[in-house]
Amino acid sequence: MPEPIWTDVDEYLTTTLIPADPVLDAVMSANKAAGLPAIDVTAAQAQFLQMLVHLVSATRVLEIGTLGGYSTIWLARALPHDGKLITLEYEEKHAQVALKNIADAGLSRIVELRQGRAADSLAQLQAENAEPFDLIFIDADKPNNPVYLEWALKFSHPGTFIVVDNVIRDGKISDASSTDPSITGTRTMFEQMGANPRLKATALQTVGAKGYDGFALALVIS
């Protein structure tokens, strides 16, 4: 659970730096009304992701884990008129909520949502000879983080930026004796990142309204 001061600081930063947005407020309300888990990134984190899209001049984004489309909308808004974002969601209910949210945000032309097991959707993308992506955001089931990283590398080119959410796990990521699949999967992913010569990687610990967590960040260099 987040410390009260973390939540207070998040609220201050959000109200000071991020303009009110009725569309995004409606997305969060729709997600809550549909009973989706409240595990979206915060507004400050979403703006960080959106800035990364701008920084790498992305025209193609892959998102693994849609939920209700909150982060999807932030990412897609940073793309140019001819940009493309493909987002993958396992749960049919989540996908239906996200599709409406994306349509209400006026982004159906840019965003393509594929519903089903992410591994299956990724294999289908490979079968279609999908072009590489400029930014890949991984925010799905944590035990499969190693699998998603391997797929991300298949869809990357030098300069692709890979972001993985929820990698600190309240600090439990440092526990080598953990048998929690979310921990062991994420630790394996970190080991893959550190050992892969194609990647220059780091991680940022975060505190805020969502508690103690963080992002893994990797730049594809070859």
Image: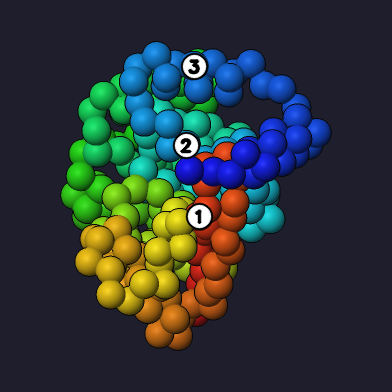
Where does label 2 land, which residue?
A: 40
Q: CA distance from mark 3 to mark 1?
A: 24 Å
- Local packing at callout 1 (Cα closer than 10 Å; few below 14, some 14-19, many 20+) is many
Q: Is residue 195 above or below residue 216?
A: below
Q: Amino acid at mark 1?
A: Asp
Residue 141: which disc? none
What residue appears at the point 63 percent right and 53 percent down from the top-left corner? 52
Residue, disc 3: 29
At label 2, counting other C-alpha atoms closer than 10 Å, the crowd grade (few under 14, some 14-19, many 20 or more) is some
First in sequence: mark 1 vs mark 2: 2
Please, what secondary structure does the residue beneath circle 3 have?
helix
| Picture coordinates of residue 16, whole percent (x, y) | 80, 33
**Which amino acid, by three-letter code, is at mark 3?**
Ser
Q: Position of residue 7 (x, y in %)?
A: 63, 38
Residue 199 visible? The answer is yes
The residue that mark 1 highlights is 213
Name the outermost residue toward the front. 4
Residue drawn 31% across and 28% down? 95
Residue nearer the viewer, 178 or 121 = 178
Find numbered disc 2 in the image and state the secondary structure of the residue it sits on.
Answer: loop
- Looking at the rendered image, the disc whose residue lies closer to the viewer, 1 or 2, is 1
Name the residue: 40% across, 85% down.
195
Contact, mark 3 vs mark 2 (Cβ under 8 Å): no
Outermost residue, right direction? 16
> Residue 139 location, x and y as percent?
40, 49
Task: Please say which color scheme the image uses.
Answer: rainbow
The residue type indicated by label 2 comes to Asp
